[in-house]
Amino acid sequence: MFFPSAELIANMLGVRREGVTEAAGKLQHLGIIEYRRGHITVLDRTQLERQAWECYRVVKAETDRLLPTVAALSH
């Protein structure tokens, strides 16, 4: 699974790119993602969800509420 660049993620979250880069480095060290040339690839979604459980749960619930059609397709 491919995700946008760290800079784009930082802009979406309203944080500094350096913070995203640091977090991505830690997740890469754990083998959860691959981070190269500013792009992030999720290697182990289950572990990623575990590492970011509370944030993931809140964002997922809000996404499901706002985009019910997408949520229904993913179940």
Image (spheres, rainbow, N blue to C red):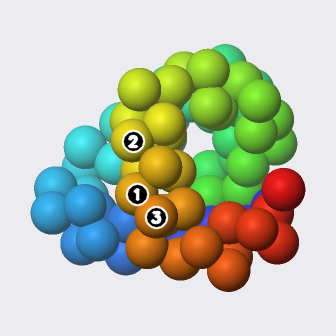
Is tag 2's residue or tag 3's residue first in the polypeptide sequence?
2
**Residue beneath the point at 41% across and 26% down:** 54
**Residue beneath the point at 40% across and 57% down:** 62
At mark 1, the secondary structure is helix
At mark 3, the secondary structure is helix
Whole-number angstrom distance, CA of label 2 to CA of label 3: 11 Å
Circles 1 and 2, Cβ within 8 Å, touching? The answer is yes
Please tell me how many numbered marks the rendered image carries: 3
| Amino acid tagged 3 | Arg
Q: Return the residue nearer the eye: 54 or 1.
A: 54
Front disc: 2 or 3 = 3
- Specify whether residue 7 is in view: no
Whole-number angstrom distance, CA of label 3 to CA of label 1: 5 Å
35 sits left or right of 47 in the view: left
Q: Is residue 5 above or below residue 49?
A: below
- Specify whether residue 71 is in view: yes
| Amino acid tagged 1 | Glu
Q: Which mark is residue 65?
A: 3
Q: Position of residue 28 (x, y in %)?
A: 63, 33
Write down the quadrant of residue 15 in the picture.
bottom left
Write down the quadrant of residue 64 in the picture.
bottom right
Q: Position of residue 7 (x, y in %)?
A: 34, 70
At mark 2, the secondary structure is helix
Identify residue for label 2.
Answer: 58
Around disc 1, counting alpha carbons within 10 Å, would you say few (fewer than 14), some (14 to 19), or many (20 or more)? few
Identify residue for label 1.
Answer: 62
Around disc 3, counting alpha carbons within 10 Å, would you say few (fewer than 14), some (14 to 19), or many (20 or more)? few
Q: Is residue 56 above or below residue 65?
A: above
Circles 3 and 1, Cβ within 8 Å, touching? The answer is yes
